[in-house]
Image (cartoon, rainbow, N blue to C red):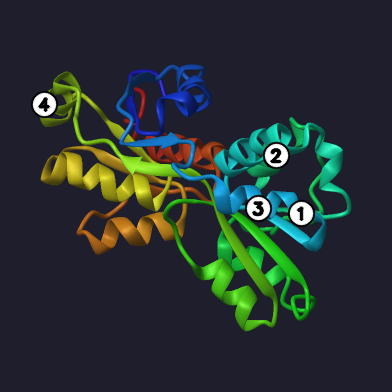
Amino acid sequence: LLGQTVLITRPQAQAFTLSRMFTELGAGCFLQPVIEISAPLDWSAADEAMRRIEQYDWLVFSSVNGVRFFLDRFCEIHGDLRCLGNVRLAAIGPQTASALESYHLKVDAQPAEYCAEELAALFQGQATGSRFLLARASRGREVLAETLSDAGADVDQIVVYESSDVDEVDPEIAKAISNRQIDWVTVTSSAIARSLISLFGSTLHQVRLASISPITSATLREAGYEPDVEAASFTMKGMVTAIQKAVKKNAPLEE
């Protein structure tokens, strides 16, 4: 990716890993977070669910943020992750599973494809009568909870982190996009897609958009923005690989 410039749009605290992937391949990186992640304004519902964690069969995480905020708060309440007891852990994908492993916790279920629909499908045959606790953001899709409920599960959802849109753009970043000085913009969630479009509007047609998943791509298309590449595996690494393939495909032949 030597000579390519990439705009990272993830929250600042989470941008380093993705930025490093690109810089190690020779790309230059800009950072413009378009959403912010923070602790919930009200922990009461989550705290109550954590205090009766032994009542649940499954604890389900759909993001790295969910893992971090839930487990840190759980430790504040219980003082020991062993208080999770016999609850089984499910993760939507390898990055979420890796976050759990950083707390020395092993995942009991993870879908082959990293989306809520596939995660829900894992439980289709065993959902009836089981109790699920979903640790989630303040906004997001309801497909997992709805699918599990329809399959006969008892589902509780708790907000363990707030996701909010950034409302100001670095003028230098806006200028770089307008002047076509940025080649690629990463889009790693539907929330990021919506905020990105709100912030930059039609100037996004000046850059190439890299989507992490079909769900994110659908969000972009609904707003009139066609992603130039989409990750084959719905991870940051998959998105980087998709960009690599596109750049290689369009590279001029050496004379």
Mark found first going from the N terminus, 3 or 4: 3
Q: Which amino acid does label 3 sit on?
A: Glu
- Relative to 244, is 88 above or below? below
Q: Name the residue under label 2.
A: 74
Quarter holding the C terminus is top left
Q: Residue visible at 35% across and 44% down?
A: 192
Q: Does 14 sit above or below residue 188?
A: above
Kindly report the distance in space between the C-alpha atoms of the residues bearing marks 3 and 4: 51 Å
Q: How far apart are marks 2 and 3 (CA)?
A: 11 Å
Q: Where is residue 101 in the image (x, y as percent from the top left)?
A: 76, 35
Residue holding disc 1: 53
Q: Nearer the viewer, mark 1 or mark 4?
A: 1
- Inspect the image, locate mark 4, and give the three-letter code of the amino acid beneath it: Asn
Q: Where is residue 187 in the image (x, y as percent from the top left)?
A: 37, 43
> Is residue 246 or residue 214 the one in the foreground?
214
Q: Which quadrant: the N terminus?
A: top left
Mark 3 highlights which residue? Answer: 48
Name the element at disc 4.
Answer: loop
Q: Distance between the residues labelled 2 and 4?
A: 47 Å
Q: Is the residue 156 above or below the residue 10 in the image?
A: below
Q: Which amino acid type is shown beneath numbered disc 2? A: Phe
Cα–Cα span, label 1 and label 4: 53 Å
